[in-house]
Image: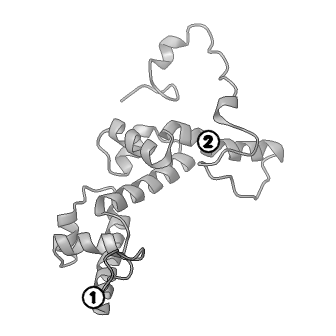
Amino acid sequence: MPSASPSPDRERDQPGQRPATRRHRALLFTDAAAIVRAEYASDLSLDDVARRIASSRRQLQRAFAEAGQTTFRGHLTAVRMERAAELLASLPLPVREVAARVGYRQPAQFAKAFRRHHRQGPSEYRRAARRPAAALATADGGMSHEPAATPERQPPGRTEEEEPAPPPSPPGSEALTGCGSSGGSPAS
């Protein structure tokens, strides 16, 4: 007689589920995840991906739940947020451009999703990602071959609250930067 309480490994080891079913769902997940990685910036939908891999919507949902331990939308968002983090850390693109490159039409929607995923906004993430590299370059004359600290972690002994205030702007520069713009470039 089976026990009434589900096992902690229920998602991984479905009782009564045939090994062929588990393998099929793992392959569905692998195929769908490959499409998401390749086309994360386009307007992907669960139905579209299911059709492209010759599966039903429900089978693909099950594949993401069982093999991927996530949902289609959760996986798509995670891929987009990781790519956005790479872009923010490596290229001097405006946040609006990063949002567009990873599939968001609205920068505000992107910023909200980014903050939810990385626990800090895109601009804060960029500053944190660049700070360790700048500190290493200054400390050894730009010759460091050590990897920069990950943006999610602060360097030892430093916190966000301890950041020095930016230098005061020269008189009359308020008209040049505009309200709410980043980097002093005009909004497009």
Q: Is residue 32 visible?
A: no
Snapshot quadrant of residue 1: bottom left
Return the x and y of residue 99 as percentages of the image width and height. Answer: 38, 44
How far is the residue under mark 1 from the one under mark 2?
A: 49 Å
User: What amino acid type is highlighted by mark number 2?
Assistant: Ala
Return the x and y of residue 12 as percentages of the image width and height. Answer: 39, 79
134 up-or-down from 165: above or below: below
Q: Is residue 61 visible?
A: yes
Query: Which residue lies at the image location 51% right of the left edge and 25% below the top edge?
Result: 184
89 left or right of 94 in image? right
Of 27 and 36, nearer the camera is: 27
Of 159 and 2, nearer the camera is: 2
Return the x and y of residue 181 as percentages of the image width and height. Answer: 45, 25
Foreground: disc 1 or disc 2: 1
Q: Which residue is mark 2?
A: 128
43 left or right of 148 in image? left
Q: Residue furthest right?
A: 140
Q: Which residue is mark 1?
A: 16
Query: Which residue lies at the image location 43% right of the left edge and 25% below the top edge?
Result: 186
User: What amino acid type is highlighted by mark number 1?
Assistant: Gly
- Of marks 1 and 2, which one's residue comes earlier in the chain? 1
How packed mark 2 is, by other alpha carbons closer than 10 Å (few <14, some 14-19, many 20 or more), is many
Return the x and y of residue 113 as percentages of the image width and height. Answer: 38, 45
Label 2 element class: helix
